[in-house]
């Protein structure tokens, strides 16, 4: 169960619409390394994680990624708010507009729609945490690329915040992986010892 605080984790205050910027940034909503995929990845992986403190890490970060998805959605919304049809056509956003108007729809910057293949849940503690560390680095790289393309300080400010959180998440997953490696042995693997799955804490 979660308690929902009705404000963004970090403020988004964009005063100048920019549909071209929105086309780039939307990838962190529904792209392969975006916040939707991250939240689903971590909140799914926690069920088969054998250590309660690492389950807590996955829950904490998965929940925060939902907050980041809200931030990215707010950025895209503010960048497309009140644009005229001509401005949308001139920006190259016409194909998106025809299907979704300016509603939020999860897709990559390339236009590829979100799919569950964007996130992995393998059921193996080391595999999943290694995947998570890689995912955070891929997201950080995507934010780096966005910052290389976007010069508006109102847009850059929340993007820089989101980038910093990817680094923190990478570090926390690294700590979690070390905990697992320090404690995991052959008796902890479900495939080897099914009895363990019935006894482990939820």
Image: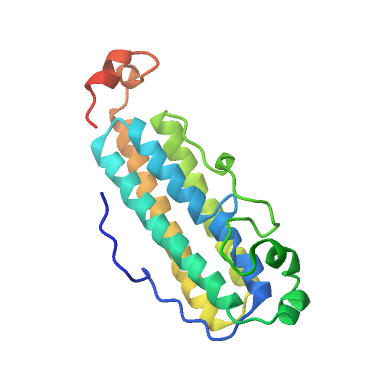
**Callout count:** 0
Up-down: is 155 above or below 112? below
Q: Position of residue 103 (x, y in %)?
A: 58, 66
**Residue 60 spot, x, y in % from top left:** 31, 51
Q: Residue at x 27, y 53 (%)?
A: 2
Q: Is residue 114 above or below residue 72?
A: above
User: Foreground residue, 38 or 7?
Assistant: 7
Q: Quadrant of residue 107?
A: bottom right
Q: Nearer the viewer, residue 113 or 82?
A: 82
For this rendering, which residue is in front, 99 or 10? 99
Residue 76: x and y, percent? Answer: 56, 70
Seen at 48% across and 77% down, the residue is 157
Residue at point 50% right, 66% down?
72
Q: Is residue 1 left or right of residue 157?
A: left
- Quadrant showing the C terminus: top left
> Looking at the rendering, which quadrant does residue 183 occupy?
top left
Residue drawn at (41%, 44%) of the image: 42
Which corner quadrant of the image does residue 174 belong to?
top left
Residue 133 coordinates in the image, percent (x, y): 46, 46
Pick whichever, 166 or 174, lies toward us.
Answer: 166
């Amino acid at each position: 169960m979660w308690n929902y605080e009705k404000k963004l984790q970090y403020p988004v205050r964009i005063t100048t619409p920019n549909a071209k910027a929105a086309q780039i940034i939307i990838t962190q909503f529904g792209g392969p390394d975006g916040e939707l995929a991250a939240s689903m990845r971590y909140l799914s992986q926690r069920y088969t994680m054998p250590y309660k403190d690492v389950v807590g890490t996955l829950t904490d970060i998965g929940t925060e990624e939902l907050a980041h998805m809200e931030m990215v959605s707010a950025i895209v919304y503010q960048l497309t708010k009140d644009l005229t049809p001509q401005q949308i056509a001139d920006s190259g956003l016409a194909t998106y507009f025809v299907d979704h108007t300016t509603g939020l729809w999860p897709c990559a910057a390339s236009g590829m729609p979100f799919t569950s293949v964007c996130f992995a849940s393998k059921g193996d503690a080391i595999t999943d945490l290694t995947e998570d560390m890689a995912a955070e680095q891929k997201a950080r790289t995507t934010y780096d690329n966005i910052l290389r393309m976007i010069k508006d300080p109102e847009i850059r400010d929340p993007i820089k915040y989101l980038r910093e959180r990817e680094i923190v998440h990478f570090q926390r997953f690294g700590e979690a992986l070390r905990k697992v490696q320090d404690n995991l042995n052959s008796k902890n693997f479900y495939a080897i010892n099914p009895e363990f799955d019935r006894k482990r804490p939820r």
